[in-house]
Amino acid sequence: MAENAVVKEQLTDAMIEAGAELTSKLDEIGLSVTAAFWLLIPDLNEWRLLFASEEVNIEGPRAVYEK
């Protein structure tokens, strides 16, 4: 069944640019980012920038967060 959601906080161009800049910075420090995307958390009406990296599987999440 389809569910309706009202999004009060829109994903802005500034947020998209900031996400692209952060992704570039991660690349500069040598962290391989496989995917980066904004995800809306409807219950909180909040956007989250999420990253995926194979390095988490290789080095573990703690090592990647420390980078």
Image: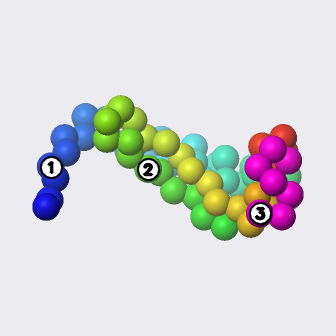
Amino acid type at mark 1: Asn
Amino acid type at mark 2: Leu
Indicate which disc, 1 or 3, sits on the residue closer to the N terminus.
1
Indicate which label's residue lies in the foreground, 1 or 3. Answer: 3
Q: Secondary structure at mark 1?
A: loop
Q: Which mark is residue 4?
A: 1
Name the spot of residue 13 as percent of width and height, x first. 43, 46
Q: Is residue 41 visible?
A: yes
Q: Residue furthest front?
A: 1
Indicate which label's residue lies in the foreground, 3 or 2. Answer: 3
Residue 47, picture quadrant:
top left
Amino acid type at mark 3: Asn
Residue at 44% from the left image edge and 50% from the top image edge = 39
Q: Which mark is residue 39?
A: 2
Residue at 31% from the left image edge and 41% from the top image edge = 42
Q: Secondary structure at mark 3?
A: helix
Q: Which mark is residue 66?
A: none
Name the spot of residue 25 as percent of width and height, x first. 75, 49
- In the displayed structure image, the side of residue 31 where residue 8 appears, left or right: left
Give the Cα distance between marks 1 and 3.
36 Å
Q: Bounds of the magenta span?
A: 57-63
**Residue 27 or 34: which is nearer the viewer?**
34
* Quadrant for the N terminus in the image: bottom left
Q: Magenta residues: mostly which secondary structure?
A: helix
Give the Cα distance between marks 3 and 2.
22 Å
Tell me if label 1 and label 2 are in contact, CB under 8 Å.
no
By what rule are the colours in the image chosen?
rainbow
Name the spot of residue 3 as percent of width and height, x first. 16, 53
Q: Secondary structure at mark 2?
A: strand
Decide whether residue 59 is among the magenta residues.
yes
Give the Cα distance between marks 1 and 2.
16 Å
Indicate which disc, 1 or 2, sits on the residue closer to the N terminus.
1
